[in-house]
Amino acid sequence: MSINSLEELSKAACHGVRFILTDVDDTLTWHGRLPEQTLAALTGLSRAGIKVVPVTGGCAGWSDMIARTLPVEGVITEGGGCFIANTEGVLDYHFWRDEAQMRADQTAIMEKVKQSLSAFPALRLARDQSYRLTDVAIDYAQDVRPAAITEKDALLAKLLAQGLNAKASSIHINVSGGGYDKFSMAERVLRERYGLSDEACRQQVLYVGDAPNDESMFARFPLSVGVANIAQHLENMQHHPSFQTQQPGGFGFAELAAHLLANR
């Protein structure tokens, strides 16, 4: 499947965008940092009335900070396990299902992950695991240097063979309870918080990402954009974005924002 260049995202399509859902690691950030161009882009989009909701596998603790400090509507965190909404400066946590049950599921998942992880000494639990409320994250390329790609692939296959809901981001393997993903929570938020129909979502929502764990979003949002660094993953992905930026990470996000705002 060929991917269109960003310049082919039409003026009519740009004019219709009211919401941007975006991955965070290596989509808003680059090499672990938030470029000043990204912050300027988020500010410009907010001023133009475009609502931005980061959708991340990152931990709830980190997402709480993002929801409080950046010009965003809130954050879908831990791969869809929770939506942290910012309503006039007050945060509300909305879990996919009962919070107590999700915490119990997380404990059970942790036991299974630890049993498998012991066979892969190059990998380790993510440093932010203590700040997670619903899932378990395994670091293979965040603080693990060089990135342990071979071990990541082997562990991911082992976890999937056990029937666990495991997905790889650009830095972590995220393991969570079944029944939800990034798209499921995004769909719920768009429907329940903003009243969008399926057709409105197709016309008004644009998704931006960089990795295989964004596939559920690429598959369902016709207006989808991959930042340039997604190129390394495309051959292993079934669902691709419709458009691709020339710049990587947060620089690509800023490139997209500039294109959108110039064509509205």
Image (cartoon, rainbow, N blue to C red):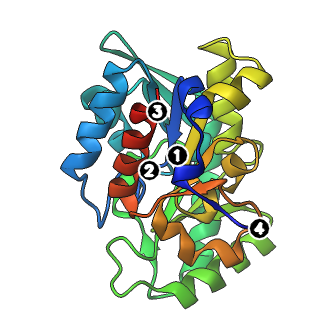
Mark 2 vs mark 3: give the one in front: 3
Q: Secondary structure at mark 2?
A: loop
User: Where 55 falls versus 97 (above or below)?
Assistant: below
Mark 3 — residue? 263
- The amino acid sitting under disc 3 is Asn
Q: Return the disc, 4 or 2, that comes first in the chain's sequence.
A: 4
Tags 2 and 3 in contact by the CB under 8 Å rule? no
Q: Residues within 10 Å of mark 1 (few under 14, many from 20)?
A: many
Q: Which residue is pictured at 67% across the width and 53% down the height?
A: 242
Camera-side residue: 43 or 91? 43
Mark 4 → mark 2, Cα distance in angstroms? 29 Å
Residue 201 visible, this orientation: yes
Residue 97 visible, this orientation: no
User: Where 209 falls versus 195 (above or below)?
Assistant: below
- The amino acid sitting under disc 2 is Gly
Q: Return the disc, 4 or 3, that comes first in the chain's sequence.
A: 4
Q: Quadrant of residue 2?
A: bottom right
Tags 1 and 4 in contact by the CB under 8 Å rule? no
Mark 4 — residue? 1
Camera-side residue: 6 or 219? 6
Tags 2 and 1 in contact by the CB under 8 Å rule? yes
Mark 1 vs mark 4: give the one in front: 4
Q: Return the disc, 2 or 1, that comes first in the chain's sequence.
A: 2
Mark 2 → mark 1, Cα distance in angstroms? 5 Å
Q: Which residue is pictured at 42% across the width and 55% down the height?
A: 27
Q: Residues within 10 Å of mark 2 (few under 14, many from 20)?
A: many
- The amino acid sitting under disc 4 is Met
- The amino acid sitting under disc 1 is Glu
Q: Quadrant of residue 173?
A: bottom right
Mark 2 — residue? 58
> Is 255 left or right of 154, judged from the image as shown?
left
Mark 4 vs mark 2: give the one in front: 4
